[in-house]
Image (cartoon, rainbow, N blue to C red):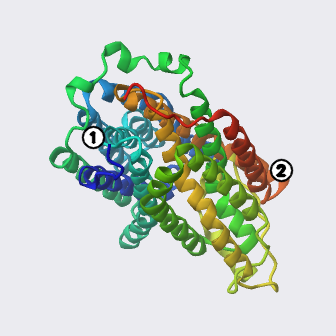
Amino acid sequence: MTTKLDFERAAPIFVLTLVDVLGLTVLLPLLHLYAAKYGASPLQIGIVLAAFPLSQLIGVPFMGALSDRFGRKPLLLISQITTFIGFIMLGAANSLTLILLSRVIDGLFGANIATAQAALSDITTEETRSQGLGLIGAAFGIGFVFGPLISILTLEVSDNLALPAFVAATYSLISIFLTVFLFKETLPPERRGGRGRATNLLAMLKSGQINVLLLLMFAQQLIFFGFESLLGLFTLSRLGLLGQGNSLIFIVVGVTLVYTQLRLIGRWTRKYGERRVVLIALALLSVGLILIAFTPEQPQPFYVKRIVERALSADTDVTSTEAVIGEIAVDLPDDGNNGIGGLLWILVVIIPLSVGAGMIRPSLNSLMTRRVGREAYGGVLGLSSSAVSAADAAAPILGALIFQQFGSGAPFLLGGVMMGGLFLLSIIVIKQPTLNIKE
């Protein structure tokens, strides 16, 4: 059994996933503006933002199970076509109802990422599966670096919000052609599950094989996505950073994620096994979040409080967290203590946090696939994606409440302590499989 990933077979899956992710990340920073354009309240904007992950919670497990029965390619194409339709609807929408409907359609049927993960699981061995699944994370890292840049350039060309949606639709259309002409079916008919086996997700949960791992996936994503959704507000209150400064931080995060998932995770998984990599990731996430909470309150060197206040009063942007919870009052740092120390601190401590984030999901997904047979990869990865979607929908609300009630550092400090608790729990409950008897 080979110990090296077959990049020739994995490359087309990586490329089409990257194109899909670029379409998603072009729109991600702008979704609240589509709703605000039609006079949506903060709560209504929050509903629009939550519509996609909540729809994914329902749709992705069944799309994944269907891919176990009918193959990856047809379900991947269905997912990409509905994503394309959703983006076109968003660009052409003339009401808040149509915007919401576009996100629901994409969420219910857009199982692109889960199906791509299942395809990578099909072509990898137990030794290379985490590395293969890490390619999906690498695609996300690259997408989160370049997608927002494409979005900014698109809006520079035109102030029309329809244009970024149509650009995202173009990327989605490209991914459809890539799937048609480059993607080769990874699940031949003889390896597909039967009708009951492919669709009986409740039976998979009742068996208890993956329940603990699913709960761990949900819990770590709840904590980490709370960090992601609050980071902009946190750096504003501690460092006085606006959009450009936060872009620098996210570029560092994106580059670190790509390096971790292309270079580190395969090597470490083969050396230590998925269980130890999960423990390493949880430890890094815990330490990183706690260190973020103690970021010095030192505004960046060019910070001037009155200029930032003027920029904020003129800025109509609403963050995802603000959209869900309502307007959040952020205390800006005072002038006079300017320096580079706070910014350097966060740029350094964000690295172990990003390494942990780059390792945790591929390793947990790999452990889940090792507890079921190949004929159930799509279903189990669909359930995993649903756990992530549920966490993504809940995290901004919980994080924002803690931010408002207990201060800017509280969500990260609490999150770090909880990640530490997950680390200790994982030592007890996660066992490294020695052999997948169903493989």
Instruction: Give coordinates of residue 376: x percent, y percent.
Output: 38, 26
Instruction: Give coordinates of residue 57: x percent, y percent.
Output: 50, 32
Q: Residue 226 got which mark?
A: none
Q: Nearer the viewer, residue 437 or 199?
A: 437
SS label for mark 1: helix
Q: Nearer the viewer, residue 411 or 155?
A: 411
Question: Which residue is drawn at the image coordinates 32% and 27% (left, top)?
Answer: 68
Q: Amino acid at mark 1?
A: Ile
Compared with 109, 314 (above or below) is below
Question: Which residue is drawn at the image coordinates 44% and 27% (left, top)?
Answer: 372
Instruction: Give coordinates of residue 54: x percent, y percent.
Output: 53, 35
Residue 94 in sight from this viewpoint: no
Q: Amino acid at mark 2?
A: Gln
Residue count near mark 1 (Cα–Cα under 10 Å), binned few <14, some 14–19, many ≥20? many
Question: Which residue is drawn at the image coordinates 53% and 21% (left, top)?
Answer: 205
Whole-angstrom CA distance, mark 2 to mark 1, is 43 Å
Q: Residue 405 got which mark?
A: 2
